[in-house]
Amino acid sequence: MGRFFGTSGIRGLIDKHLKPDFCVKIGLAAAKFFGEEANIIIGYDHRPQSRIVASAVISGLLAGGVNVLDAEIIPTPAVLYGLKEMKLDGAVVVTGSHTTPEITGILFFKRDTSELSKEEEDIFEKILIEENFNRVPWNRVGRLEYINIIDIYIESVLSLIDLGKVEGRKVVVDPGNGAASGILKFILIEAGLVVQAINDYLDPTFPGRGAFPRVDVLNDLCRVTKAVKADLGVGTDGDGDRALFCDENGTAYWGDVSGAIFARGVVRKGHKRVVVTINTSHIVKWAVEKEGGEVIFSRVGPPAIADTMKKYNAYYGIEESGKYLWSDAIYYGDAALATLRMLEILEEEEKTFSELVSELPKFHLKKVAISCPDEIKKKVLEKSINELKRILPNRYEITEVIDIDGLKIIFNDNSWLLLRPSGTEPVFRVFAESQDPQLAQELIEIGEKVVKKLIEQEK
């Protein structure tokens, strides 16, 4: 039957992958996984299908004897602060996150606010495939309660911030018509900020600039940030966990850059270990090692980042998409917390965001996605290392090969090439980076050539 979980949760279309009857079974499997009489909080984004999926999952949870707190439409990080504050047994979030409007997904979280590990996903899937459910009688079904956790979200975030360092700052927010609309702005106002917002209303079609915050779609945010002379602009994704920043001059940056600024700050405060995903720019590695810290690579996705952070007792972790995790908060991204912590750094350093960026070296990161059927991804990956060694020019001296998630080859000048099959789409991704733009381009072309050749051989 194949694997249901991808990089993060179970995703798909409600008329194909997440049909209501299947979602009820997912709820029953979750009830068996968390245990009868467990207390679970559930929230969902504003896509019309998310309510359908959430209702079906809730039915399965209740039928399996689990008590459910329904937080309704809410940003994903808010659900996790609710989980943590109320000391519940787990959480479920139904969201399409950064994906296109027709997609939705189901994410599962443990008591410590991290997603299920791969081993726990395997246990969950075994229950689901074998339909090893506990269907309880009428007098033992779970209780359903509706709950508002906005206050918990606000108070939790503000408790993690030195408000004296951020109040009075000016920020522009762009929630992208996602679940953080209205809420992100309100949290920042409560922190004492002057806030202007665009695309700040719920709309499941994401008409402003789409649910996926990318540098190339944040033009309006950049323009307004510069025009109103704000300290910072922030664009979030569909459920409010990702955050991409633009500086006071209206220039937007990928999460690697802001992640490097965060990383440098936490290392300076004594947190020497920083977790980065395998596809994150080495600008973070440079910033950490310059301050005497250590970078630890993880697989892609918040579940892997959180597991690696806990394994190595790391305080901070980053995914290049704009997710920043701090162990004193939740093991997931939160755009509100990221925004406030970036403003704290501006105050502590007494510098603008553009000045902090200027202190970092320039790295050139290239990315391509190649269509690849899921069933041949493993063979393509297995054969890629020998093929690369065969065709790489002699001047490329390999210093390290990392295979925890795809195949990453690091060269002696700290340039690198990564071949990685997607965990959520039928594509094979190729990444290449170097401080030399021509070298980065050469590497990406080599990687793309190898992957395309092997895909054709395996078809």
Image (tube, rainbow, N blue to C red):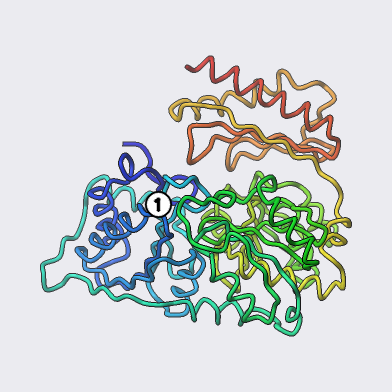
Q: Position of residue 246 (x, y in %)?
A: 74, 57
Say whether residue 298 is left or right of residue 84. right
Q: Position of residue 213 (x, y in %)?
A: 62, 51
Q: Residue at x 69, y 45 (%)?
A: 216
> Which residue carries the number 1 mark?
121
The residue sitting at the left extreme is 138
Side (left or right) of 147 relative to 341: left
Name the foreground residue: 299 vs 171: 171
Where is residue 46, by image quadrant?
bottom left
425 over 323 or under it: above or below: above
What residue is rendered at 81% in x and 41% in y? Answer: 414
Within 10 Å of disc 1 (Cα), the crowding (few <14, some 14-19, many 20+) is some
Q: Is residue 139 above or below residue 24?
A: below
Res 175 quadrant in image: bottom right
Q: Amino acid at mark 1?
A: Glu
Q: Nearer the viewer, residue 294 or 29?
A: 29
* Total labels drawn: 1
The picture places residue 54, in percent across and down from the top left corner, at 32, 59
Direction front: furthest residue = 227
**Residue drawn where x is 60% and y is 74% of the image:** 328
Instruction: Residue 336: give x, y in percent of width and height.
Output: 61, 69
Seen as rendered, the residue at the extreme bottom is: 164
Residue drawn 58% across the image and 75% down it: 186
Given residues 169 and 91, the one toward you in this image is 169
Q: Secondary structure at mark 1?
A: helix
What is the quadrant of residue 398 in the picture? top right
Residue 391 as seen in the image, left or right of residue 159: right
